[in-house]
Image (spheres, rainbow, N blue to C red):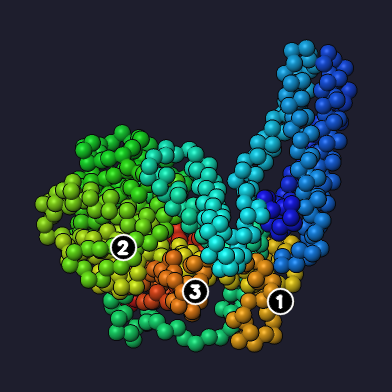
Amino acid sequence: WDGDAASGGRPAVRAPPFQLRLLLSRLRRWMGILALYTVHKGQFNCPGGGLLHSYLLVLLVLLASIICALSALVYVSMQGTISNPGPRKSLPKLLYTRLFLYLPEFIWAVVGAVWVSDSSVHCEKTVINAIIGTVIASWVVIIFTIIGVVIVFDPLGGKKTFYLTDSVNRNLESSQSGQLLYNVKNTATRVWEKRIRLLCCCIVQDDDHRVAFTSIAELFRAYFSDTDLVPSDIAAGLILLHQEQDKMESCPKEPEEVLCHSPSSLVTDDLDVELENAAHYMLFAAAAYGWPYYIYTNPFTALCKLNGDCCGSRPTDSDITGSDRHNFHFGSILKITGLQYRDFIHISFHNKIYEIPFFVALDHKKEAIVVAVRGTLSFEDILTDLSADCEDLTLEDVLENGFVHKGITQAANYIYRKLINDGILNQAFTIAPEYKLVIVGHSLGGGTASILAIMLRNSFPTLRCYAFSPPGGLLSKSLADYTKHFIVSVIVGKDLVARLSMPNMEDLKRRIVRIVANCNKPKYRILLRGCWYEVFGGDPDNFPTELDGRSQDALTQPLLAEESLMVHRSPSYNALEDESHLNSPPQYPHLYLPGKIIHIVEESSSRRLCSSDIKYTARWSNEAVFSSILISPKMITDHMPDVVLKALNSLSQEHGSCISC
């Protein structure tokens, strides 16, 4: 729901999937209450039974009215296209009719709670319990509706129009207009901040959290302020982009300008060695997740094994910081890495915003001191990920200073202070002075490990870093080039996180707006056909759009439908345009993956009833390959640590079998 519903604003009237879900849930509830009334119809001849009988009858009539209103909403919502709201012009009236019905629904829920708790009611226990269940269901629906409205409702309403139109350029000379624009931006930021606080209500909030909430709210406000899209529009756009992408991939294309994993390549040996090292160190990066990863990968046996070891010996309390109830985290790390208790120098399970868990261990097989950093596993970690502002990284004796991801850099600073100031690395090198330093991590841990490696490089010139599926928007170009000497990034398939950066997100938004705004099919048809395509496959749909038949030059100019959905361009959106450097510097500069990049792709797969045999291929790649977000069902699964480990083990075993041959 949008505050601009009264003026017929599109966000309030383009949500048939949401209304359809509400309609189906209310229909199921009405049928359940009707069945309840039919079964117990003759059991209301008791003291107070008339009240309960009246409650059910009125509730049935009220729900029938709500179902009729929702049916009308769904029907009208399905008319027209996303960018053509004309056939849906009657929707605001229907919305307010539905909104009006919430009042009697709320009143009747209160009445039902009073009547069912009345001590004068002496009916059969089964009848009373059934009515209590109905009353509870009514209150659950009302509470979740209120929560949904609080989270989704946009209080800006008509003020948003000022912010989104060209009045910024037209009237900024006026101090009154400038103040209004400032107030609108502040209001939008506060709205996002309240939503984030509500979603994170279960975690303890301190000054760091408040700063992060404000920073993330600014990020969301800047990103979403220039579009007129609702979630179902975005879903339709992603479906269309995925099908368009699949059509493009099926067309013959030129060979990629990358170094392939082939016997004739001069860098094959280097790639094979790095793949073998990556497969080895990925175990440490996965182990940093502790018991959640171990149970996820061993669902039937993990708990039994961990329970058997929970009372076993462990390092002294001074070696472990943070909570580890029943020794589950540390027991899982031992199981995954295969190390002994004495091989661990320091383990930290402490977790706050900008402070993530890590451990330091001796790897005798590779003669290395390994610092393994955990990836995203908590709300605090998500806040660290989303603190995506850029900040300068300035280090002594490092000429390639540049921009870095703010939240991840603060996490790296925390671990750096622990390793150096608390003497953890000194202790490790005292035990094994001839060992080399290796820093590893997956996802958030991979990004943190990369920046930590930059900070430690001067003190430990021989260090190596393996970043598995790190965030794409991490380092500026100069820093990314500097890290190619000592960092290796490993990316699997169409991993979303490795392609996440603000310019890439702006590019995705522009592509969604373009393809959605110019599709001539109703949204419900796009969604239904898209769900079928994602689940059962088949040939991609060739939805006709206004883009068909236009020349390439014409495609550079936005269509009227597109301009109606992208009514104002954010600073980061402008950064994508060629002429952006003539105006002001972009708010979000381009950031890249760290180090040299190994890209692992699925070459072929043969799926059987009880197993799947997937063949992978690996090659050296470059940051240009990850300059656009790819839409695929595997964009999430390709990021998971078990998938990365499986792909690396498959390639390592294949290389080992080739050597044997």
Q: Position of residue 477 (x, y in %)?
A: 34, 73
Label 3 secondary element: loop
Q: CA distance from mark 3 to mark 2?
A: 22 Å
Q: Which residue is mark 1?
A: 545
Residue to which mark 2 is pinned: 392
The residue closer to the viewer here, 448 or 512, is: 512
Q: Residue at x 37, y 82 (%)?
A: 259
For marks 3 and 1, give the CA distance: 24 Å
Estimate the x, y position of residue 630 in percent, counting from the top left.
53, 70
Q: In the shown orientation, is residue 424 left or right of residue 187?
A: left
Q: Label 2 near label 3: C-beta < 8 Å? A: no
Check disc 2 and give the amino acid type: Asp
User: From the viewer's perspective, is the residue at label 2 or at label 1 nearer?
Assistant: 2
Label 2 vs 1, first from the N-terminus = 2
Looking at the image, can residue 520 be seen?
yes
Considering only vertical position in the picture, is 155 above or below 537? above
Q: Position of residue 564 (x, y in %)?
A: 67, 68
> Residue 576 bears which disc, if any?
3
In front here: 658 or 245?
245
For label 1, count other residues whose C-alpha is less than 10 Å away and answer few (under 14), some (14-19) or many (20+): some
Name the element at disc 1: loop
Q: Amino acid at mark 3?
A: Leu
In which quadrant is the C terminus drawn? Answer: bottom left
Q: Quadrant of residue 228?
A: bottom right
Disc 3 + disc 1, Cβ < 8 Å: no
Left or right: 590 in relation to 281: right
Q: Amino acid at mark 1?
A: Thr
